Amino acid sequence: MMKGGDDMKKTILSVGLVLAIFATTAFGAAQKYTCRVTGKTLDKCCCKMKDGKFYCKLTKKTYDQCCCDMK
């Protein structure tokens, strides 16, 4: 009997994981970023970590904080 319960839990977890992936994909596609420095709207953040600071590819400058805001 315990084995059947474990299979049910695995099935529920699997279905939950699939739904979470679909939700993340759907919401991820709708999210946009705005660079506070340039005002441009982007599909992904324009900052990358470089020497412990955020490097903006658009301005080619480093900042203490990321210059992107999520919309």
Image (tube, rainbow, N blue to C red):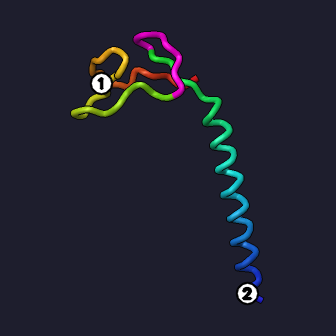
Q: Is 66 on the left or on the right of 42, as rendered?
A: left
Q: Earlier in the sequence, mark 2 or mark 1?
A: 2
In the drawing, does residue 39 fall left or right of residue 13?
left
Q: Quadrant of residue 26?
A: top right
Residue that lies at the very extreme toward the left in this rendered image: 51
Amino acid type, mark 1: Asp
23 up-or-down from 49: above or below: below
Distance of label 2 from label 1 (alpha carbons): 54 Å
Q: Which mark is residue 2?
A: 2
Task: Give how far across and how far down residue 52 sits, in percent.
Answer: 24, 34
Q: Amino acid at mark 2?
A: Met
The residue at which mark 1 appears reads as 64
Point 69% across, 47% down: residue: 22
Label 2 sits on a secondary structure element that is helix
- Classify the position of the N terminus by image quarter: bottom right
Provide residue 20's location: percent of width, then percent of height.
67, 51
In the image, the segment drawn in magenta is 36-43
Crowding near the residue tagged with mark 2, few <14, some 14–19, many ≥20 C-alpha atoms within 10 Å = few
Q: Secondary structure at mark 1?
A: loop
The residue shown at (21%, 33%) is: 51
Membership of 38 in magenta stretch: yes
Q: Is residue 51 above or below residue 17?
A: above
| Extreme residue in the bottom direction | 1
Q: Is residue 33 above or below residue 10?
A: above
Where, by quadrant of the figure, is residue 60 drawn? top left
Magenta highlight on residue 54: no
Considering depth in this image, is 40 or 37 the residue closer to the camera?
40
Callout 1: few (<14), some (14-19), or many (20+) C-alpha neighbours within 10 Å?
few
For image coordinates 48% across by 10% down, the residue present is 39
